[in-house]
Image: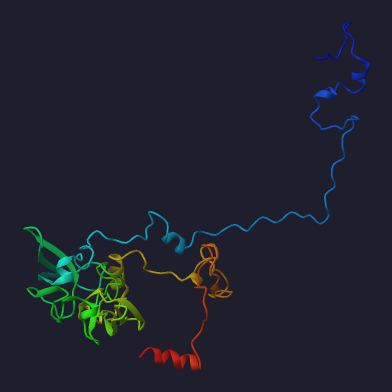
């Protein structure tokens, strides 16, 4: 290390002229080979700093419903269990099995009643207890038959291919062996329209009016789901709505977005309750702003020929 003074104790004149600054070899600045410091680059006049993005609002309700451990999860403590057909086996494919309705129970959070059906185990000395969706007209002590060779009566479970056209069915399987997926709500039913023996399919009219092509081996229960007309009775007061949704999930009361503040919802704020912009949003919108009519093809009521075609398709 070079000392700033000589062996005689005097300061070196060149260091004195520099004001005792650091040695050029130990300087933190970059220098050129000639020893001079390069000039600073001039800032472009067209380069401007971007403003910071606006702060995000609070997490909206649609985002909170998808979070893990949310308060919106369903209340399943007193549920009786999944309502479905018995597992498909050789006995149902070739013949039939007989069961007895032992009880008809109410399932909290479900509008349709459930029927407890007891079968004899086909291979072991014990009973098989299943939970079926109750069809309109089922009663305790009734015999229920499941299989290809079962009779056409209320509550029996048969493949779609064995049912005549025009049969009213419910709890229809969408795939063979899934134990029931379509027309399961209270009062719902589907209608067998036609059969195609060439590709072994059956066309069924669903409660929505849509016609779906299913495999003829898909099972269905003969009849209509019990509890029809449930929505026709008015709730009359908020207390009844509270008890209705308490056993379902946290989805009531539902505050409108235009009634919120701008920090709480994209539709909030303003001197009066209005959205302030188009209610339609694109499909790839971020979760915080994906609310309203998502990727709507059209809005408003139908007019002209479109309204006529829509009314004809419902019948």
Figure quadrant of the N terminus: top right
Residues 304 and 100: in front is 100
On-image quarter of the C terminus: bottom left
Left or right: residue 101 versus residue 176 is left
Which residue is rendered at x = 83% and y = 55% of the image? Answer: 45
Numbered-mark total:
0
Residue at 49% across / 88% down in the picture? Answer: 302
Examine the image and state in which quarter residue 289 appears: bottom right
Within the image, what quadrant is residue 221 found in? bottom left
Whole-percent x, y for residue 265 in the image: 52, 65
| Residue 128 pos. (x, y %) | 12, 62
Left or right: 106 as drawn, with respect to 274: left
> Up-down: is 27 above or below 90?
above
Q: Is residue 91 above or below residue 170?
A: above
- 55 vs 260, nearest the viewer: 55
Q: Residue at x 52, y 73 (%)?
A: 295
Looking at the picture, how far across and down is residue 9, in whole percent?
87, 7
Q: Residue at point 37% right, 88% down? A: 314
Choose between 137 and 221: the one closer to the eye: 221
Q: Is residue 39 above or below residue 46?
A: above
């Amino acid at each position: 290390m070079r000392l700033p003074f000589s062996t005689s104790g005097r300061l070196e004149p060149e260091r004195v002229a520099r004001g005792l600054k650091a040695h050029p070899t130990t300087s933190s600045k970059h220098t050129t080979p000639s020893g001079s410091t390069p000039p600073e680059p001039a800032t472009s006049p067209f380069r401007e700093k971007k403003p910071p993005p606006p702060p995000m609002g609070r997490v909206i309700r649609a985002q909170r419903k998808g979070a893990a451990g949310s308060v919106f999860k369903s209340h399943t403590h007193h549920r009786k269990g999944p309502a479905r057909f018995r597992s498909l086996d050789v006995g149902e494919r070739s013949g039939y099995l007989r069961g007895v309705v032992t009880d008809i129970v109410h399932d909290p959070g479900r509008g349709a009643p459930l029927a407890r059906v007891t079968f004899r185990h086909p291979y072991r000395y014990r009973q098989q207890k299943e939970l079926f969706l109750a069809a309109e007209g089922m009663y305790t002590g009734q015999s229920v038959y499941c299989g290809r060779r079962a009779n056409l009566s209320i509550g029996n479970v048969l493949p779609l291919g064995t049912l005549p056209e025009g049969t009213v069915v419910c709890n229809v399987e969408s795939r063979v062996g899934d134990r029931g997926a379509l027309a399961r709500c209270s009062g719902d039913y589907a209608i067998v329209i036609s059969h195609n023996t060439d590709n072994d399919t059956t066309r069924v009219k669903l409660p929505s009016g849509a016609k779906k092509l299913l495999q003829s081996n898909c099972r269905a229960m003969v009849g209509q789901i019990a509890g029809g007309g449930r929505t026709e009775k008015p709730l009359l007061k908020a207390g009844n709505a509270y008890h209705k949704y308490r056993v379902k999930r946290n989805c009531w009361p539902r505050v409108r977005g235009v009634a919120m503040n701008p920090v709480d919802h994209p539709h909030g704020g303003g001197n009066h309750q209005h959205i302030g912009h188009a209610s339609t949003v694109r499909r790839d919108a971020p979760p915080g702003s994906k609310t309203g009519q998502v990727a709507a093809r059209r809005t408003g009521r139908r007019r002209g020929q479109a309204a006529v075609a829509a009314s004809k398709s419902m019948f």
